[in-house]
Image (tube, helix red, strand yellow):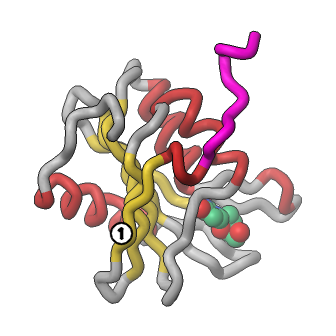
């Protein structure tokens, strides 16, 4: 169990819908792999994010990190859950860089991975990122 209060099924659905909608704005001109994320702050506000690619591929920013940076820059500090939506048969987990950032700001929250056909899988950050480097090591 995480220290975060469990979200209701309808709150999960709302977060998935936010990720789907953010995905519509993906700039995935190079990979054509469109990703949407939804991040729920403890304030109740939901922040959407999409992947934003660049001709210099290394500057690409993932959907999850876009959502986190938007929320942090708006003053949010506590988070309940993050959703990720792609149009794939297997669910898309956050990449390593995103796991590090999610851990930094959100800790052990549920990561809700869904596709456009309505399939969903939920894993806790602890499962995805079992031995994180964080401020406790500094
Ligand atoms: N991507 C994300 O936005 N989030 C993920 O969880 C996995 C990967 C993006 C980065 C890049 O634009 C494209 O997907 C292909 O890697």
**Residue position for label 1:** 20
| 12, above or below 35, in the image | above
The quadrant where ligand 1 appears is: bottom right
Identify the residue at horizontal 42%, vertical 32% (top origin).
Answer: 71
Q: Residues within 10 Å of mark 1 (few under 14, many from 20)?
A: many
| Location of residue 136 with respect to 85 vertically, above or below | above
Q: Is residue 7 above or below residue 86?
A: above
Question: In terms of secondary structure, what is the magenta stretch mainly?
Answer: loop
Residue 130 is a magenta residue: yes
In the depicted view, which residue is nearer to us: 22 or 13?
Answer: 13
Q: Horizontal and vertical percent for residue 4?
A: 29, 32
Magenta span of residues: 129-138
Residue 39, magenta (yes or no): no
SS for tag 1?
helix
Q: Is residue 25 above or below residue 59?
A: below
Q: Report the residue at 47% width, 44% height from top.
A: 67
Left or right: 6 with respect to 33?
left
Q: In which quarter of the image is residue 62?
A: bottom right
Percent from the top left, x then y, of residue 47?
36, 44
Whether residue 80 sits left or right of residue 26 in the image: it is left
- Which residue corresponds to the image point at 14% horizontal and 59% vertical from the top-left? 9
The answer to which image quadrant residue 13 occupies is: bottom left
Judged left or right of residue 102, residue 81 is: left
In which quadrant is the C terminus drawn? top right
Q: Which residue is most to the front? A: 1
């Amino acid at each position: 169990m995480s220290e975060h209060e469990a979200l209701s099924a309808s709150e999960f659905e709302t977060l998935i819908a936010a990720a789907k909608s953010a995905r519509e704005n993906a700039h995935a001109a190079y990979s054509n792999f469109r990703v949407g994320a939804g991040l729920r702050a403890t304030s109740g506000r939901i922040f959407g994010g999409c992947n934003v690619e660049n001709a210099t591929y290394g500057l690409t920013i993932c959907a999850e990190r876009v959502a986190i940076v938007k929320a942090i820059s708006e003053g949010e500090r506590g988070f309940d859950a993050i959703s990720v939506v792609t149009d794939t048969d297997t669910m898309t987990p956050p990449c390593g860089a995103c796991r590090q950032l999610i851990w930094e700001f959100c800790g052990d929250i549920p990561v809700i991975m869904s596709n456009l056909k309505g399939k969903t899988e939920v894993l806790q950050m602890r499962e995805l990122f079992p031995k994180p480097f964080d401020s406790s090591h500094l």
